[in-house]
Image (cartoon, rainbow, N blue to C red):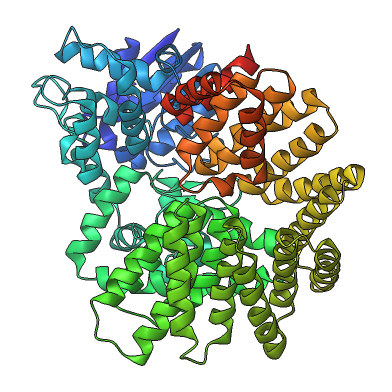
Amino acid sequence: GVIFVPLASLNSAADIVTTIAENIGFSFYGEHLPAQQMIDFLRERSMLLVLDNFEHLLDGAPLVADIVQNAPNVKLLVTSREKLNLSGEMIFAMSGLDFPEWETLADAMEYDAVKLFMQSAHRVRSDFALQADDLVNLARICRLTEGMPLALVLAAGWVDVLSLQQIAAEIKHGIDILETEMRDVPERHRSVRATFDLTWGRLTDGEQCALMRLSVFRGGFTVEAAQAVADADVRNLRKLANQALVQVSPDGRHDIHDLLRQFSAEKLAASGEQSEIQARHAAFFIEFMAQRQQDINTNRQLEALALIDPDFKNVRGAWHFAVNQHDWDALPKVLHSLWFYCDIRSRGQKAVELLEEAVRGLQSQPSTVITQLASGRILARLGWFYNDIGFAERAANTCDEAIRILRQHDSPQDLVAALYGRQKLAGFLYQPDIALSASHEGLRIARAIGDRSWEGNFLLGIGWANIVNNDLTAALQSAEEGLAILEAVGNRWGIGLAYSLLGRIKADQHDYEQAAQWFEKALIFSETFGHLYGIAANHTRQAGIALATHDLATARRHLLTALRVFGDAGYQWRATYPLAYVAEMFAAQDQPQKAVEILATVHKQRALLQLTDDVASTLRSELEAKLDSDVFATAWSRGMEREFNNVVSELLANEEE
């Protein structure tokens, strides 16, 4: 059978034997030692013995070994926050309950974290029912507690007085919300803090020091980072891991449960070391990003992205600290890597938040050469990301201000960054003269400082501007020259951009077979980098080729993929590109009124219609000429009343059906 032996209430390992005996129904007799008597009793027995909460009784671990050795048919399952460190021990690490991202109420109810939360909530409020609008906040509660059963039970205990949104906000603020006043609950289960206090009390001074210092990390850390920031070497980390205070992933990264991290951070704040450890953390990750800048212009771009991915939260923490300390010399070490990473990983909104934070910090300081130069550098990247999230006018003004400032200072690497952002934006706005001017100036500087990657990228910018000017011969020459340079230096990202440019040139030359091949190669590069915008954009371009060759089925497949990816990336404004082609597709299917509706929705969504490419204005004129004016006006009115996201959702839903 199965025998459960609770050990949490014991204060001494000496009491383990009598507690086991009581639960297996054994009575001691004679003068033999109690442990030997019990083992003799178990020797001929067959059972599963569950010893629960062993972590505070580790001096009694030899008894477990004796039972294993002398009672071969007795199996032991021992729960403990710390390893027993016995040779026959097999470890099964217990993580939190599963809480995947769900989309529907029915999906949510399938997961253990939700089931436990609902069961606990019904104890304090019998009529509690989960509504669809509650899902986002319940998901947040699950993430904040990382599925910890005790934390979920305690959080659910507040549903009689707080909304799920309020409970989530309280947990984010601190762990003290996770408590109960139930009289029959063991003391160690009355709050998460009580549980952590018991754990903390069992740690050595060195272990406490390491754990509180490690709380400065966000999203985990490497062994190298732990040593540099917290003076926690591999031995410290192993001791903490053995006590289930640090989790170790297969790739060697370490992490701390977020609630324990909050608790440990309080200890760090009270220790007087917080400022020093935060400074060491910031210095480590600023240097970490500085090292990645060497990789970004070479064939190590993918490796750089992979290194930054797990530590992006730590990088953000380092940025916040540098801004708060007004360390304007530190930020430039991060900027180029941050720009590249956030662009490729579709984190434009997060980049804007970080860069605007720095701008506000600079504005609060007296104007000096250092702050002026820092402002120019940061504005150069901020302008890029304003365009990235759909604020074209603000982006243009910001880039122009950056260029004005940087021309006054000797910082050519930052000036070329500002000029690159300006030429890119001018391309979006169909301003070929500005694009050419910025590209030629950037090209001259890149050649002067010997930066081949920038040289290749500015040649691509000249190529795009010449497309708008209908000078396809010049565009092709620049594209081929830029591609050759980028291939020579191994700039894989730039090579993918060159493929897109060459595809566009061939499409405008009506060489659709060659265009499709270039776009396919560009798509492969975007998929390799995980660049969602590039993936969606190249699907859109391939849809344009399919429409030009009257392959409507292929066009539809590419367009729906593009709409889905743009939505996943959060680039809803850029979804107007494929949606304009959807209108063209409906027109080709002899559904002109539907095409007009789509165009009207695109027009409503965009502040500047030309950003949706020439197909929008050209197609609108064609449809106006084809339809009766009243019919056109009615269809246009219907489209203007539609919500952009609803139109996209309907298109995607129809495809799934």
Q: Which residue occupies 41% across, 33% down?
A: 63
Q: Residue 139 in the image: state x and y as whole percent.
A: 36, 29
Q: Is residue 372 visible?
A: yes
- Residue 583 pos. (x, y %): 64, 29
Q: Nearer the viewer, residue 608 or 502?
A: 608
Residue nearest the observer in this picture, 348 or 243? 348
In front: 546, or 429?
Answer: 429
Camera-nearest residue between 159 and 266: 159
Q: Is residue 74 above or below residue 511?
A: above
The image quadrant where one finds the C terminus is top right
Side (left or right) of 435 relative to 522: left
Look at the image and tell me in which quarter the N terminus lies.
top left
In the rendered picture of this protein, how many numbered marks are placed on residues?
0
The residue at the point 26 percent across, 68 percent down is 274
Give the residue displayed 45% in from the left and 48% down from the top: 241
Question: Relative to residue 285, is residue 187 drawn left or right?
Answer: left
x, y percentage for residue 164? 23, 27
